[in-house]
Image (cartoon, rainbow, N blue to C red):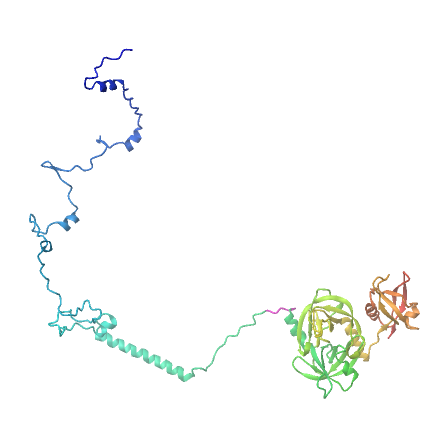
Amino acid sequence: MTEPNVNPEQPGAREAEAEADRLGPRPLARPAVDPAQAAVFGRPQGVDGAFDQLYSPRKTNGVNLAPPAPESLAEAFRRPPGAEGVLLERPREAVGDAPDAEPPLWTGTRDPWRDPGAAAVLAGPAVAAEDDAKPAKRPPGALLSLPEVLFGRRVQPKALVLLGVVALLVGAVGGLVGWWVADTGTELTGSATIAEAEAGKERPAGSVAEIAKRVAPAVVSLEVFKPGAESGEQGSGVMIDPQGYILTNEHVIASAAADPGVKVTAVFIDGTRTEAKLVGADQKTDLAVVKVNVTNPTVLQVGKSADLQVGDTVMAIGSPLALQNSVTAGIVSALNRPITAGGDNGAAPVTYEAIQTDAAINHGNSGGALVDSTGALVGINSSIRSAGADGGSIGIGFAIPSDYAIKIAKALIKDGKVQHADIGINASSTVAGSSAMGAQVKNVAPGGPAANAGIKEGDVITKIGNRLVRDSAELTVAVRAHDVGEVVPVSLARDGAGFVVDVTLASD
């Protein structure tokens, strides 16, 4: 390929050669524009350049004029009226001339407008003093009148007179009222009307409060003492008959039964005190009856202890620790509980079938009433289980069932003594590991009911009639539950064999 014939010495020869080797620009790709977008984002109509001429200054004699100044600036900085076309005078401070001194508003050393200690009075304006020694006398100003001070404006004299008359009338009426109050009563005394409210607490029939209110008058406190002695004994009793018969425990009046010189005093809920005479006492059942000579006493209704069930609500009423007419409540914890209580003052132990309750019973409750939820007598409080030397209640108390207690009371009232059924043996509880559980016969009275029925020493009695016998205490209460002369079947265990014999009970 031959090179072009170019003279390198010619001006522009190399530039022309380089331009000839360059490629031309590519054609611009101009995509179609959406008419809607062109209407929104395109140039306004009649505008071709990049910017629209929002303001075109006027041209005067070839000079572009600026837009006129805002009216507020023009008013603030224009020449004063009448000074158009005149150059303003330069400040004297700029050319070195001292400015003319303005006359002072006041003379002297005091400036009433700048002195914080200057007095504020309603008078004429502050004026310059004639000299520095004496201040100028101020002219008096207008003073406010009394109506202006009181009402903020001028008031007619008639209105002021009328106002004074009204004030005098109000004062006179107040004085008359005060005189009348002072004349009719003193400052600290007088009649008062006090509104008394009804009892806010309801006490429906059957509540503890309602039962206690009904039953408490029939329970008395018994004081047993010997005249001249420093101390005595104290217990409780229950009025069971309108003739004045009171049922209590034998150990409460034991000293009176042993010594005729010992007196028994019954104290009622209203504080009435009267002497009680001993009718009869039975140490084996721990029951006794005394009688008082009173008119129309409150008598306690007697219920059926056989109808009680474990869990029934009961209340104990008596005089524990000489606290007369105390009321405690609880439930029946157990029924038909044979217990043996130690006799007082060397007396033989007492065995009886009891109602166990958790109602608090303490010393002095003995002989008091155990009532059910209807207020009927179901037991005579007799003994407790206690812990420690104090012997206080631990929630285990015992009462003699009313069915048995009333039976004994009737016998004491009728004859003054009680006969108990007896089987004619001594027995002890069987030990653990024995072939049969019951009461083991130790001694058999010759010619007695047991001997006549063929019962021998060593036999174990397991049942009296329909009642199981599990220890010697149950044997005693099971026998006493029957009448003298009654024939009862007795179940025995002898040498591993069991059999039944009929025993005719005798009197003790």
Query: In which quadrant of the rendered view does residue 243 lie?
Result: bottom right
Asked if residue 205 is among those painted magenta in the image, a careful observer would answer yes
Query: In which quadrant of the rendered view does residue 450 lie?
Result: bottom right
Give the camera-side residue of 5 and 451: 5
Left or right, 160 with respect to 337, comes to: left
Left or right, 315 with respect to 184, comes to: right
Which residue reaches farthest top? 1
Q: Position of residue 235 (x, y in %)?
A: 71, 78
Query: In which quadrant of the rendered view does residue 241 lie?
Result: bottom right
> Can residue 147 be seen by looking at this rendering?
yes
Q: Is residue 492 above or below residue 272?
A: above
Asked if residue 273 is among those painted magenta in the image, a careful observer would answer no
Q: Position of residue 167 (x, y in %)?
A: 29, 77
User: The magenta stretch spans which residues?
Assistant: 202-206
Q: Position of residue 456 (x, y in %)?
A: 91, 68
**Marker count (numbered):** 0
Residue at (76%, 83%) from the top-left corner?
Answer: 256
Q: Is residue 477 above or below residue 22?
A: below
Give the camera-side residue of 211 and 169: 211
Left or right, 335 with respect to 12, comes to: right
Which residue reaches farthest bottom? 228
Q: Is residue 220 above or below residue 401?
A: below
- Magenta-drawn stretch, dominant element (helix, strand or loop): loop
Q: Quadrant of the N terminus?
A: top left
Q: Quadrant of the C terminus?
A: bottom right
Q: Position of residue 413 (x, y in %)?
A: 79, 79
